[in-house]
Image: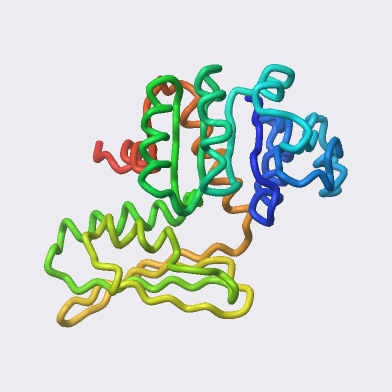
Amino acid sequence: MKVGLIGFGKAGKAVANVILQNPDFSLEWVLRNSTLLDHHSVSEFLGIESEDPACIHSLKNMGVDELFDQFPVDIIIDFSSTETIHMYGSAAAERKIKIISAISHYEEKEKKLLKKLSEKTTVFWSPNITLGVNYLLFASSMLKNIAPEVDIEVIEEHFKTKQGISGTAVKIAETLDLEKESINSIRAGGIVGKHEVIFGFPYQTVRLVHESISREAFGNGALFAAQHLINKSTGFYNFEDILRPYFTIQ
């Protein structure tokens, strides 16, 4: 499957690293705003031996229509910014390119756009695209259904400079029907990301914890999603749609 990656920050580089080492996927190109690495090879930049084209292109020198037509891909993985979907979404949908978005925060207008694009192509969005945190989310939801009156607190820990509440923590709170006041944030050092859901029962406590050790976990999650979208028709999907069949009791 041919992949185009949008965004080449810390997470984007880690995702590119994972894609380049997976024989089932070919990283065709990376699209970024800066011209600093324009036309350079991702594999050379990261020091990874790979036969993937993996050429870096800049938006300042190449438009998305030209990029999609000259270097066609089956799927786009987006690790850029909230606004970028407006730049490439329609062009990708018209060409039936599947879209995987790993953007943490979307406003309502972006969410509406994703739904509109899903009428023409396959669209997947997850505020946190690691497989483990979505397993935690699914398991937490199941436990809440078993014990709806239990006390629940959410703790999220991230690196010192991360701004705002974790999008993943907000998603956990929404799924468990909690107020944002139930989210406790910690900012320290270089913590990649840790989320904990505490279920307080009268005489016992259950803690579900997920910790990202490396940003490569984002790449594993993105490719896990991509593998499960190969045969999906047009529509809007999330991790729950992918994980639900694994929780079905035979």
Q: Look at 34% across and 43% down and name the residue there.
A: 240
The answer to whether 29 appears left or right of 94 in the picture is right
Q: Position of residue 132 (x, y in %)?
A: 46, 54
Front residue of this view, candidates 18 and 169: 169
Front residue of this view, candidates 193 and 247: 193
In which image quadrant can residue 68 be found?
Answer: top right
Query: Number of callouts in the render?
Result: 0
Q: Is residue 16 above or below residue 191?
A: above
Q: Look at 24% across and 59% down and name the residue there.
A: 176
Q: Residue furthest left?
A: 149
Q: Position of residue 20 (x, y in %)?
A: 73, 39
Q: Position of residue 124 (x, y in %)?
A: 44, 36
Q: Look at 84% across and 44% down and name the residue there.
A: 37
Colouring scheme, one of rainbow, by chain, secondary structure, one colour: rainbow
Quadrant that contains the N terminus:
top right
Q: Position of residue 72 (x, y in %)?
A: 67, 20
The answer to whether 250 appears left or right of 18 in the picture is left
The answer to whether 110 appears left or right of 175 in the picture is right
Q: Is residue 193 above or below residue 228?
A: below
Q: Is residue 176 above or below residue 6?
A: below
In which image quadrant can residue 97 be found?
Answer: top right
Q: Look at 38% across and 28% down and name the residue there.
A: 116
Quadrant that contains the C terminus:
top left
